[in-house]
Image: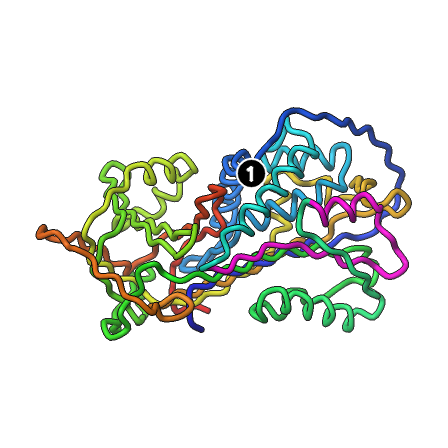
Amino acid sequence: MRGTLAICALAALLLTVSGEHHYHHSNGHEGELNCHKLSPPNADFGFALYKNLNAKAADGKNIFYSPLGIATALSMLSTGARGETHSQLFATLGYTGHTQEKINEAYRHLFMMLGNSQEEQQLDVGNVVAVRSGFSPAEQFVTDIRHYYAGETFNVDFSKTEEAVAEINRLIASKTQEKIKDMVKDLNPDMAMVLINYVYFRGQWEKPFDSNLTQKADFHVDETTKVQVDMMRRMGRYEFYQDIDNHTTVVMLPYKGNTSMMIVLPDEGKMAEVEGYISKDYIRHWHDNLFRNSVDLFLPKFSITADASLDNSLKELGITTAFSDHADFSGMSAGVKLKLSKASHQAVLSVDETGTEAAAGTTLEIMPMSMPETMTLNRPFLVFIVEHSTRNILFMGKISNPTAM
């Protein structure tokens, strides 16, 4: 697979439940909330989720997901939620104090901004709601998710579970350039609605690597395990920062367009310490301290797929009522009682020399005479794919083993 490619999809499955629910919903309109307001709470949510997933992950396991994708899906879900179900979603996402209308507007602005930076990269973010045949969700909900969340709804007969699974998976595959083929593994005939979010990203390095310089090298997964990788090499000018106090080295690799990959390499034996303190403030601190430097960079080629079942993580982060029989999704359906049954997430990242295609024109860089810094990514490192125009973290994770699919 050529190129740097990151995809994720999130499926949230809603089950019908019985029980009466009443709600009060206020309409508040404060000033315009643009998409930049979403990036701090979304980053906090992303790091809270990282710490939760990391605590559950086996040693040497890659972690990779889209905080933006998951936050988008949960925000879309909150559009149809009321009462305690709604307030828990908003509290976990860090949106308390804003109205649903303001958040909807912010996401609409975000989708517009992301759509505008498409010349040299592909970034598709969207949402699909598969609805049980014979069940019609509230018209306002359908309108809102289409208008604000690039969402669409379609009808599925959940009683024919195999056909429903195949149909939903075909749709997701078509939206993700056939990269995510089997997102939904099984469905329950009692289901009323399945929510699926997808994020597809493919970028070209602004400064491609020369494949002639790629060589086999060892990558140390941990003290006792090493694997062989194809190690790319490039000597060039990069935004670089060595944070002695926080035991990390940081480099920024720009893609063409508005996106960059920030790589954070903890010092030997310091990964757990860095994971303990890392937050959006550290990302900002590193970003603000980067300076152009000559760097001899060694980066492994890799392609990983990471699956995360989010049910327990979301419950532990505070979204509990949505999964219970007390769930209130009356904004989606006044008649049929709904609850969230399952939330799962899949992300794919592929990194090689070129980006999507070899660059036609090669830029020569003027290298100063000083000795370059050497940065060798031959042990686990953290990776963040950041979109500059909206200041959002599109993807984040830990590459513990580049050879693990």
For the point 59% across and 71% down, the residue is 178
Front in this rendered view, residue 347 or 56: 347
Residue 258 location, x and y as percent? 43, 50
Please indicate whether residue 38 sits to the left or right of residue 291 in the image: right
> Does 124 sit above or below residue 270?
below
Residue indicated by mark 1 = 35
Determine if the magenta segment contains residue 133.
yes
For the point 26% across and 72% down, the residue is 214
Determine if the magenta segment contains residue 308.
no
In terms of image quadrants, where is residue 374? Answer: bottom left
In terms of image quadrants, where is residue 346? Answer: bottom right
Front in this rendered view, residue 347 or 121: 121
Front in this rendered view, residue 113 or 48: 113
> Does 96 sit above or below residue 181?
above
Display colour scheme: rainbow
Q: Residue furthest left?
A: 369
Classed neighbour count for the residue bearing mark 1: other residues with Cα under 10 Å, few (<14), some (14–19), many (≥20): many
Total marks placed = 1
Residue 382 location, x and y as percent? 38, 51
The residue range painted magenta reads: 121-147
Residue 209 location, x and y as percent? 29, 66
Type of amino acid at the residue the image marks with label 1? Cys
For the point 81% across and 64% down, the residue is 156
Please indicate whether residue 402 sits to the left or right of residue 190 in the image: left
Residue 45 location, x and y as percent? 54, 40
Please indicate whether residue 209 sits to the left or right of residue 41 in the image: left
Which structural element holds mark 1? helix
For the point 74% across and 70% down, the residue is 167
Q: Quadrant location of the N terminus?
A: bottom left
